[in-house]
Amino acid sequence: METLTIKLKSEKAHKLIKDLEDLNIIEVLKTPASLSSLRHQIKTKMSSEEIDKQLQTLRDEWQSNI
């Protein structure tokens, strides 16, 4: 069989794909998004250092809540 990559544009499309999978017509293979593809979705570009700083801040907040 052929493997295709598709981009769903609405929740209705997601339901249709799920229905096709439930009927054993297709098999959904989920692939993790690469970092580079995620970076294109970020509205405000950040450097690696800024990302590391923000992650550390979030981790510190999480630790203080324990």
Image: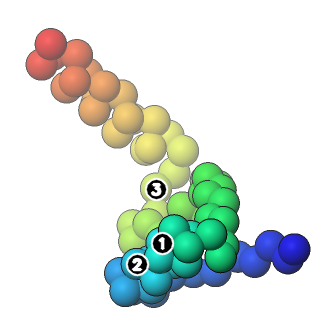
Do the CB atoms of the residues marked 1 and 3 lie less than 8 Å apart? no
Query: Is residue 40 in view?
Result: no
Q: Residues within 10 Å of mark 1 (few under 14, many from 20)?
A: some
Furthest residue in direction left, as rendered:
65
Q: Residues within 10 Å of mark 3 (few under 14, many from 20)?
A: few
Do the CB atoms of the residues marked 3 and 2 lie less than 8 Å apart? no
Residue 9, horizontal then vertical, whole percent: 45, 86
User: Can you say whether 9 is above or below 30 in the image?
Assistant: below
Q: Which residue is mark 3?
A: 46
Element carrying mark 1: helix
**Which residue is pictured at 39% across the width and 67% down the height?**
44
For residue 15, which numbered disc appears in the image? 2
Q: Which residue is mark 1?
A: 18
Do the CB atoms of the residues marked 1 and 2 lie less than 8 Å apart? yes
**Which residue is pictured at 62% across the width and 58% down the height?**
30
Under mark 2, the amino acid is Lys
Element carrying mark 3: loop
Of tags 3 and 2, the one toward the viewer is 2
Of tags 1 and 3, the one toward the viewer is 1
